[in-house]
Image: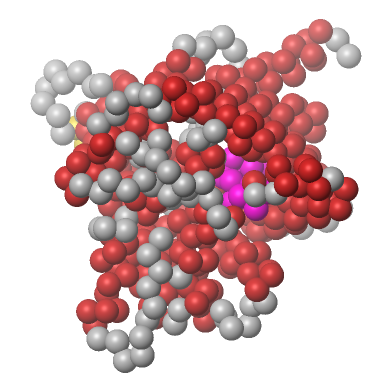
């Protein structure tokens, strides 16, 4: 395990969190971003749930994709990549259902905190997005890198949604023109945030 | 989300009501903040937007139709998974078609075609309308919502491509010496463009109601109140 190996992982991580932020540059997970960012506490829980589910499903789906679906994969020789979408989404939905059942069984406190976010997670495009970006031909990443990539993307989502929740709590005191309220002002603030994140461009050389 | 009940023996006007609502007053993108992800991601060029809008029209109307056809045999507990499987099957069809006949387009859209599956517009319509209404009405409802989505996307795309790159569908349209507004073709520009469109439409129509949270139908009760 030499320095360049760890350096490579650090680059994948930083790129996923900052320069290629899943929300601000890839536009994924916008729906829950808009719906949940009204209070800091909810944003924090939603973000944590996204981090957890993204990492777990990315690892499982990486295994399925490169172990079964790809042509000449170890387990099945046939090219089944056309099934990717349906298997990935079924996997995510099943995983979320499983997590919900486990949490409900073992920690009612955690369940009451996270319960309402879990069904939302299934249709959160950030999760499916990370899974699909991971298998893009030009990504070409190893199992460990994909774990780091998923972790970074999840944390990037957490960062963005918490920043937004903070901004929106400040915004409550502001006098926003009536037609601009709601989607309009949210989008414009997000645009400003995306511009701020663009300042990091070039920090990570890929 | 306007849940309308289709009465028996409806006239043409009532059949077309979902289409009208989806395109105008109940516009999914502007009123309910549904499907915002791809509204931002694919609007850099008008050509990618057109393909995306056509794909969404197909998937939304067909999935509403199919969900409505089998609505009586889907058990209530597994309805979300059943809906998602229907939607993903349709998306796979679109993806394979694009790969076979429009390979360049398929490459430039990348994973965003696959992400139609999680476009909450579709799941929102199947869950809120198609699961309890008759097939033809559901088909039109899905078509109408997708049409409203397409209109907003096209407006943003035309704005971003002409001003941001000085072209329209790849042809130069702006006068000689026009300096493209780089901001609009970049990622933050997408947010600004959608914000501006939402602002203008709201200022004209005067709808002051807060946009409901997306995917609310899937999650049950959701947070209420404006920004």
Please tell me which residue is depicted at 64% across the width and 42% down the height of the picture.
A127
Please tell me which residue is depicted at 58% across the width and 29% down the height of the picture.
A40
Position in image of residue B46 (x %, y %)? 30, 42
Residue A130 is one of the magenta-drawn residues = yes
Q: Nearer the viewer, residue B24 or A198?
A: B24
Q: Nearer the viewer, residue B130 or B115?
A: B130
- Residue stretch in magenta: A118-132
Q: Quadrant of the N terminus of chain A?
A: top right
Position in image of residue B38 (x %, y %)? 44, 44
Say if B24 sits above or below A28 in the image. below
Position in image of residue A167 (x %, y %)? 46, 23
Position in image of residue B124 (x %, y %)? 49, 60
Asked whether residue B38 is in view, the answer is no
Asked whether residue A103 is in view, the answer is yes
Say if A101 sits above or below B13 in the image. above
Q: Nearer the viewer, residue A164 or B92?
A: A164
As drawn, is A152 to the left or to the right of B171? right
Q: Residue B3: name its quadrant.
A: bottom left
């Amino acid at each position: 395990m030499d320095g360049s190996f760890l350096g490579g992982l650090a680059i994948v991580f930083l790129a996923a969190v900052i320069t290629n932020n899943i929300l601000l540059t890839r536009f994924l997970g916008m729906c829950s971003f808009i719906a949940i960012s009204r209070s800091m506490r909810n944003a924090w829980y939603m973000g944590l749930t996204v981090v957890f589910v993204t990492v777990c499903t990315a690892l499982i789906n990486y295994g399925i994709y490169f172990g079964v679906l790809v042509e000449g994969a170890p387990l099945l020789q046939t090219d089944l990549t056309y099934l990717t979408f349906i298997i990935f989404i079924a996997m995510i939905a099943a995983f979320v259902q499983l997590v919900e059942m486990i949490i409900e069984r073992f920690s009612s406190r955690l369940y009451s905190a996270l319960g309402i976010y879990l069904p939302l997670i299934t249709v959160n495009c950030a999760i499916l997005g990370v899974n699909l970006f991971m298998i893009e031909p030009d990504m070409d990443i190893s199992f460990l890198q994909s774990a780091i990539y998923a972790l970074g993307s999840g944390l990037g989502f957490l960062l963005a949604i918490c920043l937004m929740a903070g901004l929106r709590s400040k915004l409550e005191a502001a006098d926003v023109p009536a037609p601009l309220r709601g989607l309009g002002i949210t989008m414009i603030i997000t645009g400003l945030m995306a511009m701020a994140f663009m300042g990091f461009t070039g920090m990570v050389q890929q | 989300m306007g849940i309308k009940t289709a009465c028996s023996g409806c006239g043409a006007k009532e059949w077309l009501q979902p289409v009208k609502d989806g395109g105008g007053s109940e516009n999914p993108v502007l009123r309910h903040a549904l499907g915002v992800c791809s509204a931002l991601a694919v609007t850099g060029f008008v050509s990618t937007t057109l393909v995306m809008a056509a794909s969404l029209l197909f998937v939304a109307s067909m999935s509403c139709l199919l969900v409505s056809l089998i609505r009586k045999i889907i058990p209530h507990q597994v309805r979300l998974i059943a809906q998602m499987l229907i939607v993903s099957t349709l998306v796979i069809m679109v993806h394979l078609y694009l790969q076979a006949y429009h390979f360049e387009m398929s490459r430039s859209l990348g994973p965003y075609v696959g992400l139609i599956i999680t476009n909450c517009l579709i799941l929102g319509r199947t869950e809120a309308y198609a699961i309890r209404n008759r097939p033809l009405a559901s088909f039109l409802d899905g078509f109408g919502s997708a049409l409203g989505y397409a209109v907003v996307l096209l407006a943003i795309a035309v704005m971003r491509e002409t001003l941001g790159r000085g072209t329209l569908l790849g042809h130069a349209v702006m006068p000689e010496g026009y300096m493209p507004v780089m901001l609009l073709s970049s990622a933050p520009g997408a947010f600004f463009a959608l914000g501006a469109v939402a602002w203008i439409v709201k200022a004209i129509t005067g709808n002051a109601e807060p946009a409901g949270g997306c995917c609310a139908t899937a999650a049950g009760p959701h947070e209420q109140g404006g920004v």
